[in-house]
Image: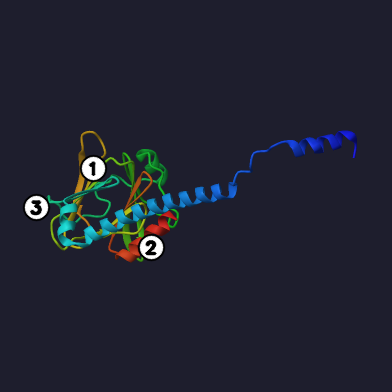
Amino acid sequence: MTELERALVLLGSDVDYPAEPDLRSRVRERIARKRRVRRALVFAVALVVVAFGIALAVPDARSAILRFFHIGAVTIERVETLPAARERPLAAGLGPVLSRQEAEASSGVPLVLSAVKPSRYYAQPGLIATLLEYRGMPILLAEISGDQTAITKKFVTPETHVEPAEIGSTGLWIEGGRHVVIWQTPAVETIQLESRLAGNVLLWVEGDRTFRLEGDLDKGQMLQLARDITR
């Protein structure tokens, strides 16, 4: 060891260094704090979902909630008397048959559809729709961009059941009874395109898009189709 090295060693032994911080305890405390916050948020969301599900399961509460309920671009309204409507084809009021490219250009909405390849498409401003064949039955898929109301659902009979559906950020299943679907243009001044009696419907929201499936399927079949479409 040189004289310089010995001098540095001696100098080092005389210098008072601050105590080493307890980094391990600090890191553990920070991780635990984040976990507590995350658990609180998850619990809060779970409470909202459970409360909503319980409310819809109770007839009186469900009746009060669904007098006017909004999900994405769809409004569900309970009325005393149904508006005039009749049974019509699923795509009635949605305009002429278009190619997919034409429908996407006209609506401004790129279609989210990966599982099936239909050939008939329909479009309105902010709304694109297509007819699918699933389990040998025609099913109408409509996709609406944004949250401006484009569809109004009106029902009056107690036989119409509305319940939560586990899909997307928010999902609803509607079946039974007589209910009316009203297609509208999402403009400042609403223009009604068509009213008709509707079949079983699955509604759900993902991001800024509202999805609607309608047809003669049960809830489980409709959920399977919905997941196939958006996976």
Residue at the disc numbered 2: 224
- Residue 195, image x and y in percent? 18, 49
Identify whether 85 is placed above or below 222.
Answer: above
Question: Which of the pair 41/188 is nearer the observer?
Answer: 41
Q: Residue at x 45, y 56 (%)?
A: 231
- Residue 174, image x and y in percent? 24, 59
Residue 216 visible, this orientation: yes
- Residue 100, image x and y in percent? 40, 46
Residue at the disc numbered 3: 80
Residue at the disc numbered 1: 184
Q: Amino acid at mark 3?
A: Glu
**Between disc 1 and disc 3, whose residue precedes?**
3
Question: Which of the pair 68/87 is nearer the observer?
Answer: 68
Q: Disc 2 versus disc 3: distance between alpha carbons?
A: 34 Å
Q: Amino acid at mark 1?
A: Gln
Q: Residue at x 48, y 52 (%)?
A: 32
Q: Amino acid at mark 2?
A: Gln
- The kind of secondary structure element at disc 1 is strand
Marks 2/3 in contact by CB < 8 Å: the verdict is no
Q: Disc 1 versus disc 3: distance between alpha carbons?
A: 21 Å
Residue 66 visible, this orientation: no
Q: Residue furthest left?
A: 80
Q: Disc 1 versus disc 2: distance between alpha carbons?
A: 28 Å
Q: Residue at x 58, y 50 (%)?
A: 24
